[in-house]
């Protein structure tokens, strides 16, 4: 768990280092200290506290780098990109990892690592309003951006061609707050990095991209130019190896792989059903998930993908209820009334927990959960077929990123003829899991803004346990 440090200790160490007669490299300093101190921001694209601990793209990268160096990771949180850079320049951290765009102005102040991601700066507006397509279209609206940011650097450059361009620089807001202001019609436009926009659009589905303000730009870690390059070189080597091994791509898939295709109508309906339907069943999801070791929000997201939380839902193939159990599976689970919400949710939770238990323990989260969800959709046997084909084709059968690329092959005779269980609607299973991931993210985003509530009381239900027979 990262510790939030004050800036003084590292600054003092750097002063002592400058006065030392025996040269010590920056890398050696970090290793002797036993701590890698990084300044970052608290945001969805960088670092945040999840239900089971710290998460975020930057956090995952930093933790891996610290582990490789054999030191503890400690984080300093800054309120804005400008504060991140100021903290680094003041000697408050060994490096800055905060979704920093590499710009010419910043390169004059700092050194940057090997890039790990590409983003585009985008002009954001509210759907339903007239779409801006070029800088001239912004003149009659209120444009608000992050102060002293790469966005402001870009607009300053654009103003040489469009001197009438104007905006308000907000020194206190973060990117999500500015996107919210557009969504709530407090301002007309803002500028956001494409990775921040794509994550937040699911929560504010009316937001739209007017046009791209920049070409793709790299994100990288920043280092002080006043220290030697030993730690920077170690970071470059680490990031390059992550890229070469495919681990970086898998990490990007984990955070962004399921949000590339935005469905406005579906997302809007989901947000409405959260208010209209979920309250009636939330306690059932919470209690069943707690009994079977699941995250209730993942269970609820699965139920929504299955039935849109309609207890009377029936598919053309005869599956029924909130969790859309087949008659055979319901019988094996002890569910006698599939359209009864209590029985259906408990049966679905038990079924999902047993599928999760069948996925090899060596597979880490969240991949293990995604594979279990795919099994819920097409069956465990077909999921294993996809994993075997993945391995035969040179992929990693324990990686959801690799397996999801193989799943559509189960449609094709050339491939499913090589499997034990044959044809399956693998493309449907792929979309099934990706939809659940998006629904789950929205539920997490909403519930983390709630006040803590006590555990729910147990509802009446059949006497089931995780040891009950499923197959």
Image (spheres, rainbow, N blue to C red):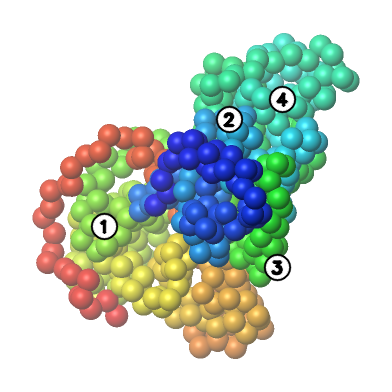
Q: Residue at x 64, y 35 (%)?
A: 89
Nearest to N terminus: mark 2 or mark 3: 2
Residues at discs 4 and 1 in contact (Cβ within 8 Å): no
Pointer 2: what residue?
Answer: 83
Nearest to N terminus: mark 4 or mark 1: 4
Residue most extreme to the right: 161
Nearest to N terminus: mark 2 or mark 4: 2
* Quadrant where the C terminus is found in the figure: bottom left
Q: Nearer the viewer, residue 407 or 336?
A: 407
- What is the quadrant of residue 315 in the picture? bottom left
Residues at discs 2 and 3 in contact (Cβ within 8 Å): no
Residues at discs 1 and 2 in contact (Cβ within 8 Å): no
Badge number at residue 289: 1
Q: Secondary structure at mark 2?
A: helix
Pointer 4: what residue?
Answer: 152
Nearest to N terminus: mark 1 or mark 2: 2
Which numbered disc, 3 or 1, marks the residue closer to the eye? Answer: 3
- What is the quadrant of residue 460 in the picture? bottom left
Label 1 packing within 10 angstroms: few (<14), some (14-19), many (20+): many
CA gap, disc 2 and disc 3: 32 Å
Q: Nearer the viewer, residue 86 or 81?
A: 86
The reply, left or right, for residue 331 in relation to residue 55 is: left
- The image shows residue 192, relative to residue 53, as above or below, that is above
Which numbered disc, 2 or 4, marks the residue closer to the eye? Answer: 2
Badge number at residue 244: 3
Question: x%, y% of residue 247?
Answer: 61, 65
The reply, left or right, for residue 342 in relation to residue 471 is: left
- The image shows residue 382, relative to residue 90, as above or below, that is below
CA gap, disc 3 and disc 4: 34 Å
Residue most extreme to the front: 21
């Amino acid at each position: 768990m990262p510790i939030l440090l004050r800036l003084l200790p590292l600054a003092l160490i750097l002063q002592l280092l400058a006065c030392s007669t025996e040269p010590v490299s920056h890398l050696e300093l970090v290793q002797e200290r036993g701590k890698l101190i990084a300044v970052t921001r608290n945001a969805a694209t960088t670092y945040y506290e999840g239900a089971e601990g710290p998460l975020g793209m930057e956090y995952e990268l930093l933790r891996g780098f610290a582990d490789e160096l054999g030191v503890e990771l400690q984080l300093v949180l800054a309120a804005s990109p400008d504060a991140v850079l100021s903290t680094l320049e003041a000697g408050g951290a060994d490096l800055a990892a905060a979704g920093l765009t590499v710009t010419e102005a910043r390169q004059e102040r700092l050194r940057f690592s090997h890039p790990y991601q590409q983003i585009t700066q985008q002009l954001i507006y509210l759907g339903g309003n007239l779409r801006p397509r070029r800088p001239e279209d912004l003149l009659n609206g209120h444009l608000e951006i992050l102060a002293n940011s790469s966005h402001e650097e870009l607009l300053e450059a654009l103003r040489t061609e469009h001197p009438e361009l104007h905006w308000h620089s907000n020194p206190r807001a973060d990117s999500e707050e500015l996107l919210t202001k557009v969504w709530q019609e407090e301002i007309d436009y803002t500028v956001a990095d494409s990775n921040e926009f794509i994550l937040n659009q699911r929560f504010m589905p009316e937001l739209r991209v007017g046009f791209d303000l920049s070409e793709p730009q790299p994100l990288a870690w920043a280092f002080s130019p006043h220290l030697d390059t030993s730690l920077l070189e170690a970071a470059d080597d680490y990031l390059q190896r992550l890229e070469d091994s495919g681990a970086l791509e898998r990490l990007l898939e984990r955070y962004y792989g399921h949000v590339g295709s935005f469905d406005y109508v579906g997302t809007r309906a989901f947000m409405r059903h959260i208010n209209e339907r979920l309250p009636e069943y939330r306690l059932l999801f919470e209690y069943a998930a707690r009994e079977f070791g699941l995250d209730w929000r993942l269970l609820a997201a699965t139920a929504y993908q299955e039935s849109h939380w309609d207890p009377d839902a029936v598919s053309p193939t005869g599956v029924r209820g909130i969790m859309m159990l087949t008659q055979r599976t319901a019988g094996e689970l002890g569910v006698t009334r599939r359209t009864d919400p209590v029985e259906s949710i408990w049966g679905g939770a038990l079924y999902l927990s047993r599928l999760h238990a069948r996925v090899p323990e060596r597979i880490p989260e969240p991949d293990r959960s995604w594979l279990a969800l795919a099994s819920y959709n097409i069956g465990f046997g077909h999921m294993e077929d996809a994993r075997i084909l993945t391995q035969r084709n040179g992929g990693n059968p324990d990686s959801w990123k690799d397996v999801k690329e193989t799943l559509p092959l189960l449609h094709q005779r050339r491939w499913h003829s090589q499997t034990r269980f044959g044809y399956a609607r693998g493309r449907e299973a792929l979309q099934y899991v990706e939809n659940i991931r998006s629904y789950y993210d929205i539920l997490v985003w909403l519930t983390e803004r709630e006040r803590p509530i006590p555990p729910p009381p147990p509802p009446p239900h059949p006497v089931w346990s995780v040891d009950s027979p499923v197959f």
